[in-house]
Image (tube, rainbow, N blue to C red):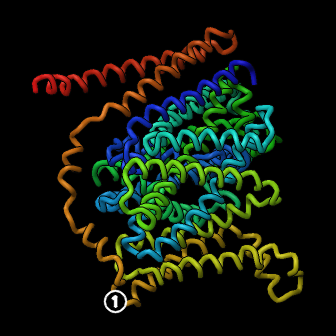
Amino acid sequence: MTTPDYLTLLFYLVGLFVISTVSAKRTTNQSDMFSAARKSPWWVSGLSGFMTMFSAATFVVWGGIAYELGLVAVAINTCYGIAALLAGYFVAGRWNRLNISTPAEFVRLRFGKTGLHFFTWIMLFKRILGVSVSLYALSKLLVALIPLDLNWAIILFGSIVILYTMQGGLWAVLMTDVLQFIVLTVLVFMVAVLMIGSVENPATFFTTVPDSFFSPTADKYGWFFLCGWVTIHFFMIGAEWAFVQRFLSVRSPKDARKSAYLFGILYLVTPLFWLLPPLLYRGEVSGADKEQAYILAAQSVLPPGALGLMIAAMFSATASMVSSQLNVFAGVLTNDFFKALVQPNASDRTLVLVGRIFTCVLGTLLVATAIIVPQLGGAEKLIVTINNLLVVPLYAPALWGLFSRKIGIREMVIVILVSFSVGAVLRFGLAGNPWIVEGDTLYALATYLADNTKTVEVLVGVLLPVAMLFAFELLKKEHDKVGSEVVRLMSEPAKPDLEQSTTQFDPFPVQMVVTSVLILGGWMFLLGLWQDESRTVLMVFAFVLLFLGVALRAWLVRRLRPLTTSSDAE
């Protein structure tokens, strides 16, 4: 890391707090804090959902798979796109039609207060575990480049995300996600272009990599796994609260579907683009640590200053996931626990304050969990497996309840507990169990389970809970007594004021994008003036960004002119 790199990273972090401060001015009540007052443009919601799927694991795990196995990593990530398109078509609009403030409100209406408590605490436990591993992975990756103790890195990076989420609410999360999307796209594109330029002889590359490098399937990542991956992420994107929150934050069901479609299309077309660096790096260096392949590829081609932006992009990926989870669970605890159970008549000012306190508390818990991850000794894989085994059993009953009146709290509890228990026994009780030795009755089964972990996760974590829900749907004759309010909300026409608001234009998101693009272009221009190395590349990217920013600014001025004229006439 050079001086320009440190200045770039510092400059980026300051930018996050500036956006948070500006967004805080729009956060005056709990609706602003947790659902952006249902005024988020569909493209902002879509980009935010796209970024929420990113984390440090995107670079470490998928970059490592791309380096080791090739295009199978691209195929796995396009599954997200297919899942998002399906969620947009079947689910997104239905969520928006409910006209609720938080996803937990649906759980309370559909499954009762018992269902809300059961679902919320399991969901919170799951997400704290999963996100803490991402925060730990990010810090572990960056301390290799920044001279900082691992625990202090976790505290520093976690505190930054907590502060801007606490200050600006969902608007801050949405707008920083857009900034992070811009930075990530620019830097990954720069690395990809420079990596392509560094390949001197394409023919040599094709002879260097393994023969299976260009196959969409490999090893344990076969077609069965890919189908299961689509199914898992259909339920995740369709029912996980961070994504549902995006569907609730836009103005209409149509906008909710469009946001999911944008998310899906981006994941269909971009995986090859942002996985190119580790793919091409395999042709240059065949013995590198696969988990460091992405950052090593970036280091090999990026000029000073731009590496700081690459670190910022990696931070952005995890920051987006962390901030989304903090905001959505702070909203649940504020609206569906504090307001519903403690102070029903609380003022908007009180609810915003309580929401910020919950954000801080949850963030502190997250940081503390991330710090103890390495002390558990290999617990990262354990936690990730637990996460995978819980995804469909947890989300499928909730999503099923959006369409069917037969699934109630009893069925939800049965599906979650049975699926997770069976999965835990097979994955941890039998697979790899040192007490089972060759010759034992269970040895053959334990060996199969250990050699086919991904298949087991799909069978137990996907097919079993879905099969149980189908069985309940067919065998249960009466409707669940709870949930009539959801049926009423779904049958009501959309509120007139929400439909009319689709014609209103809010310039704030576009203004933030224009400002971010112009500042990023200007900073890259300064970096180009600062140094001789790769000056041409930096200048080209700088001028492209400046041109794009000016063009967007001109469009915004033309878009606002009729509104200004109309206002003056009145």
Task: Residue 356: tell me if it is visible.
Answer: yes
Return the x and y of residue 295 as percentages of the image width and height.
72, 36
- Between residues 149 and 466, which one lies in front from this camera angle? 149
For the point 56% across and 77% down, the residue is 416
Image coords of residue 359 (percent x, y): 55, 50
- Left or right: residue 360 versus residue 238 is right
* Residue 241 percent coordinates (x, y): 47, 59
Apparent side of residue 63 relative to residue 444 in the rendered image (left or right):
left
Q: Quadrant of the N terminus?
A: top right
Name the image quarter holding residue 303. top right
Residue 28 location, x and y as percent? 38, 42
Residue 418 in the image: above or below residue 377: below
Q: Which residue is mark 1?
A: 478
Q: Residue at coordinates 66% horizontally, 59% vertically from top-left?
A: 129
Quadrant housing residue 567: top left
Name above or below for residue 421 compared with residue 316: below
Q: Is residue 49 left or right of residue 37?
A: right
Between residues 286 and 107, which one lies in front from this camera angle?
A: 107
Q: Residue at x 89, y 81 (%)?
A: 437
Q: Looking at numbered disc 1 in the image, what kind of residue is underneath it?
A: Glu
Q: Quadrant of the C terminus?
A: top left
Instruction: Decide: is 473 above or below 343.
Output: below
The answer to whether 271 is drawn above or below residue 411 in the figure is above
